[in-house]
Amino acid sequence: MALGTRPHHHYRTRGALRAAVLLGVVTLLPPTAVAASAMTSDPVADRQAGTPSTSFRPGAEWRDTDGKVIQAHGGQVLQAVDDDGKRIWYWYGEDRSNGYFDSPGIHLYSSHDLYNWKDNGLALRTLSSQDQFTNDKYFAHLYKDYTAEQREIVWRDLSTNLERTDGWARPSILERPKVIYNKATGKWVMWVHSDGPSSPTSTSTYARAEAGVAIANSPKGPFRWLGSYRLNHVPSDSVPWCGSSPAFDPAGGMARDMTLFVDDDGIGYIIYSSEENRTMYISKLNAAYTYLSAPPETAVQGKDFVRTLACNQREAPAMFKSEGRYYLVTSGATGWDPNPARYATATEILGTWTDRGNPISGPGAGDTYRSQSTNVIPYDRQQNKFIFMGDRWTPSTLATSPYVWMPMSFGENGTLTIGPDAEWQLDDLQPYQHWTVTTPMPDHVWLRDTSTLPTQVQVSQAGVTTTHPVSWDPSTVAQPGPTKLRGTLDDGRTFTRDVVVVPHGLRYVVNAGGAATADWQLLADAGSSEAGLLNSTPEQPVGADPGTGTTWGYTGSSGTYGGAAGDLYNTLRWAKDKEPLTYTFTGLDRGTYTVHAGYWDPWPWANRAAQVSINGTVVDEERLFTSDYTTGEYANISVGDDGEIVVDIAPTRAPDIQVSWLMVTRTD
Ligand code: GAL
């Protein structure tokens, strides 16, 4: 890893990834994709035998009622009413039958049961030649009233051919189409990530970064292209672009991965990854859903749009509403590679969004069961039954990238769970009514000691409050530092609370990197109230503490990651030049001590590892750094008259090492 560039490695820019993919420099195919495409025989056989599907098989090949592989990637399923007044589902998506470029357009399928899909053909067609405006009936009719200038825009946005006829170096692309119905106008409105080169000579596929819109009189199309636009944004130089540069894009308003949402009051919204995919925006649409509620020049933040999840670098947004709350499920930004999902909730759509973490735990958490979100289907909103739609992108064979539809469920305070990716049926979706534990919880708890926690809690559901005995999961208070304390009610329902676990006898609590995070402050306060802390700041180079005068601190050439808004784990100090990081603690009374250390890696693909020694003895042969928060516990350290503990963390592999936090506690 090039040393100077390391702090930037958490931003894997789309441009760089895209270039790498196109040049064939790296293979982004997940190792497990082979297994996925091997699971294809059953559905094919079923379909050929004419047997309708009665279940979802996430990741398996999915064929339409004619036996052809469904082409509806990065898509959405929309509920409508058919000519017989029956509920019908429309599935719109990217037609990737020709791979990455040369997409025929946006494909449509329809279904009455969500399992079996009929091919309705292309809802929006792309163009391969400008002559089609005159010699192809479809385009001649659809664009008959368009001026030459308007046709120029349609051509620019819908020409997806790699072999271009107009001298441009690169084609355009259409991704993540979403359709909403406008009750007032009776029109179906499609928005799509419309991208491509910004000029004839540009070779970038993601330079234009716009949202395009098309309109139709029928859900089946034909959708007529209206144009594509940059969207609302704050003044480009008014905010740090979170590691990217506003100078890179002075116009602002970039819109890449996107989705649509219509609220109960009929107001439509477009949700898009902006500022070079660093920050999410939610913008109100106009009454016809064909443009923004106000042009970017006059749009007012908080009224017309909100800039949210700033610097979280989220993509692939999917929005839904449950029990009066808005949910936004997103992916990280790693191109076709899967990554952990996260979700955020809000009570006002243009208000404050709160990150609620990963909706998946256990297997599947690290890569969203090898998928990337694209949409959430409100299957039954009354009963809060929702379906997660994702894509398991296989960049080498995009055409057959499997679909991953998984059940969603809810817990205390609307906590969302997605998965698992096993075969399932609609009947497996459980009804849910919002419930929450209202008893306040202490902000800290002692290590392996739940005696300070309540033995019963109040639960509120639909305005009724009941009292329940609660048991606390000891494994959630078994490590010091921030934790998700888990309680189980007498009826089996579980809930979690963010608390900080504090070891008794705390003498030093160091947040490596030096950020005064809230959890560090809680630990420092709890520690001071008990044994008495010898450090008064989160971290310092070795020297006298400004508050206590005791000598402590780190040595080793290094840099820092994260800020005060983070936590103990995701703020850290990283070493340079193969040097170890050494932390010295003095002023300790004679006795036996335990050192706890926290590890986490924002650059887990580096596969770094360390050997940890305390006072010259190896206590950890090979500590691996991963994307999980992990803790090392090094007990029975004898401190003699020198009153000193020296913790040394040295690399055992090529990449440099790092550490998130250290605690020194006296155990007798
Ligand atoms: C993903 C994005 C996809 C597609 C892909 C190309 O991050 O969600 O829609 O653009 O990158 O690499």
Image (cartoon, rainbow, N blue to C red):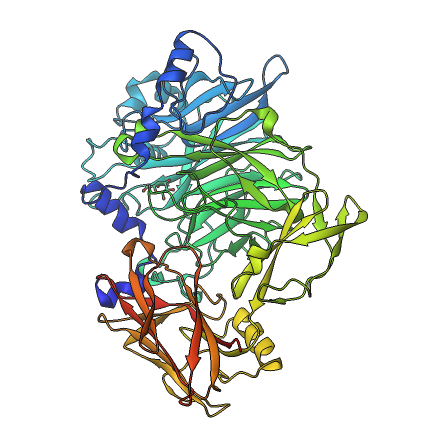
- Is residue 603 left or right of 109 when viewed as pictured? left
Residue 71: percent from left, percent from top: 38, 24
**Residue that appears at 63% across and 44% down:** 411
Asked if residue 287 shows in the view, the reply is no
Image quarter where ligand 1 lies: top left
- Is residue 342 left or right of 186 when viewed as pictured? left
Work out whether residue 180 or residue 75 is closer to the camera in this orientation and state it: 75
- Seen in the picture, residue 544 relative to 561 is either above or below; the reply is below
**Residue that appears at 30% across and 66% down:** 611
- Seen in the picture, residue 476 relative to 20 is either above or below; the reply is below
Q: Quarter of the image containing the N terminus?
A: bottom left
Work out whether residue 424 or residue 613 is closer to the camera in this orientation and state it: 613
> Which residue occupies the extreme top position in the image?
49
Asked if residue 507 shows in the view, the reply is yes
**Residue that appears at 36% across and 46% down:** 209
Residue 322: percent from left, percent from top: 64, 40
| Residue 642, quarter of picture | bottom left
Residue 3: percent from left, percent from top: 23, 67
| Residue 608, quarter of picture | bottom left
Work out whether residue 600 or residue 169 is closer to the camera in this orientation and state it: 600
**Residue that appears at 49% across and 56% down:** 309
Residue 306: percent from left, percent from top: 54, 54
- Seen in the picture, residue 4 relative to 170 is either above or below; the reply is below
Counting every numbered tag in the picture gives 0
- Is residue 411 left or right of 423 when viewed as pictured? right
